Image (cartoon, coloured by chain):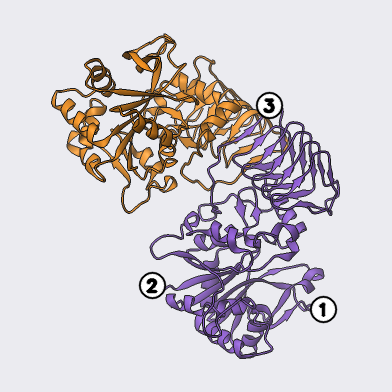
Amino acid sequence: MNVMGIIFANDATTGVLTEKRTMASLPFAGRYRQVDFALSNLAAAGVRHVGIISRHSYQSLMNHVGSGEEWGLELGEGGLEYLTPFAQSVKDSYRGKLDSLHTAMDFLNEGAADELVVLIDSAIVSNVNMTEILNAHIASGKDVTVVTKRGICNGEKKIDLALNVADGEIKDIMVDYAASEAYTASMDIFVTSKAWLINMVESAVAHGKCHMDRDLIMNGWQTGVVSINVYEFDGVALFNESEEEYYHNTMALLDKDVRNNIFSGNHAVWTKTRDRVPCYYGENVKMENVLVADGCMLEGEVEDSVLFRQVTVEEGAEVEDCIIMNDCVIGKGAEVKYAILDKEVTVTPGAKICGTKEHPIVIKKGETV
Amino acid sequence: MYFHKKRVIAMLLAGGQGSRLHVLTRKTAKPAVPFGGKYRIIDFPLSNCVNSGIDTVGILTQYQPLELNEYIGNGQPWGLNKTNSCAQVLPPYERNDKKSGWFEGTANAIYKNIDFVDRFDPDYVVILSGDHIYKMDYNAMVEYHVANNASCTIAVRTVPLAEASRFGILNTNPDNSIYEFEEKPKVPKSTNASMGIYCFNWSVLRQALIEDEEDPNSDKDFGKNIIPKLLGEGHKMMAYNFDGYWKDVGTISSLWEANMELLGKEPEFDLRGGPNETIYARNDAHPAAYIDEDAKVSNSLIAEGCEIYGTVKHSVVSVGCTIGKGAIVEDSVVMPGVVIEEGAIVRHAILGENSKVETNAVVGGVDKNEISVTSKDAVVKANTVLAAGAML
């Protein structure tokens, strides 16, 4: 089976955390960036030809993914390609996914004609069995397979693409709507054949249509042009589509079942190697319910939190219900509660930061409090 | 294939059995023995090479090489897989001349790989071994060697006089040139102990290796044969003083001690370091470590991929270990993938890779002079005792 992957890096929706980076390069779960999960989902299924579509702020993304070595993509043939906008069209270069796929047509045309294409976003974190999804797609004989998750639609959260599926049949499709529990939410993972996708993208763009969920999936289904197979994923899917969701989903990783499913449900999760030393826990450290990445120096108290690499928590400092990203320093006697500290934040000794569970405080990269 | 000339290459002797590590090297070569939570012993000389700007390393393997060869792979973790760099594993091989067959000594191992070294046409060859924990700038030693116009330079460290008779001792003139080498002298004349790290002019070493092969009485060993031979021939040989941390981890107790010396806020040996002091290792895909609300952790190193529900005190816990509820781990080295089940107690022990201590089992005791050891994949059955100093 020839398979190529296309990862969408953008759709920045998590406020200041994605001011200067893509959703794909948003740090997640202590030692990863969100794109690692998409890349690992593809790598575990042996996909050796991947394009990453990115519109802006892709410096941190390219720095992280590099040549794709960690995901087996440093190859002479196929391998990894960055599909960034052409220089002359920087301003609002893509209006939708179909538009961006249209500009990536050269990439799509590469390789074997009989390839399948996996389209996958970086904002929804999961550990899926892509081989099984690909096989299900082939067996279905449908034009496109949409991977979905039940339990996300709750009548409150606005869902990009929600499908009402009963008795194996699609009853309704809605776009950008707070669909009810009866609906299953798209995980922004699609499988199609390459020939079909190229054809549909060219035709859609020629008709001035650029929105994948609305123009291709929903309208296509309504008009009977597109046949859809729904693959319902039964593992954990973390929709990190807002700051609050990002915070809540990070904290969910402290649950063993969620953690096991995300990190080893179907395969390992690979990330860029940083040769950090194992974490050092000091003499009087107090740790309760914490995820800790390598390179930390911990001497204070940390509870119900996730610490990224190379974080320092000095003596007498208290950290509770926090996400602390790489290279932050929490000074002696400082108190940090319900907060997200972006990379390289320094909390000076004795300082206090206190958010609430519903609205955690976010401190920008590199700031000193 | 085209080979660039290299000014310096390194040859790393990694074929020794390491029999004094007993069960830990039953299935594994000593250089592949895990160390410090996420490393293996060979990471230290390999990383030192990279940090010293030496990008061509021949690694001589012989004893139980499977795991070691797998670990080194193409040298990617150390950045040695690029154009014009390499980490080349050199196992013994068969051919129809004297260079055929097993390595019969440290010098013989290099002799049998003269062809490999010749391809790079190096001016200097640094000889290293895969059983020491230290950070050292080999380039500084090479520059010292060149500046002194020496044929051979040997790294030395000062040892207590009382211990000097356990080492190869170098007696030097005031200018640090060597006039005498004594292997384990009964009455040592100095405290300059050889670290087994040599820098040679390749032309001199090449000739000495060929001549030594002709000597039927030679043990084909650097310390016993090559060094005394070159001294006897009147070559200029220099001692290069090194005063940083250096530890031979060739015994159970020294391996345990070296791990313990990584602990503390300002440890005797700090794995952290400046820009040119990173120790590189092959990294597995493990998530961040999880420390449960009932866990108690103090003065310990815990690597990624661990799940800690019990108590860990003054210990090194390597990648991918699980320590169950109510379990106690103290003064111990827990190698990668170990599972310690609920209620088990582990004290003064080294637990080999993927070994398992089942529910309520007890390993080791209170005496730090009696280290208990489990071998790779061993299982200490539930409710049983592995006594202090015992091996399984």
Q: Specify whether B47 is left or right of A183.
A: right
Q: Specify whether B193 is left or right of B345.
A: left
Q: Which callout, 2 or 1, points at the residue further toward the start of the chain?
A: 2
Given residues A299 and A243, the one toward you in this image is A243
Say the numbered circle drawn on residue B293: 3
Question: What's under tag 1, amino acid-wise?
Answer: Lys
Given residues B293 and B89, the one toward you in this image is B89
Question: What's under tag 3, amino acid-wise?
Answer: Glu
Q: Residue at x 59, y 49 (%)?
A: B272
Q: Which residue is drawn at 45% across and 18% down?
A: A150
- Crowding around mark 1 (Cα neighbors within 10 Å: few <14, some 14 to 19, many 20+) is few
Q: What element carries label 1?
A: loop
Q: Residue at x 31, y 51 (%)?
A: A77
Given residues A340 and A305, the one toward you in this image is A305
Q: What residue is disc 2 on?
A: B3
Q: The purple chain is which one?
A: B
From this view, report whether residue B330 is shown above or below residue A171.
below
Question: What's under tag 2, amino acid-wise?
Answer: Phe
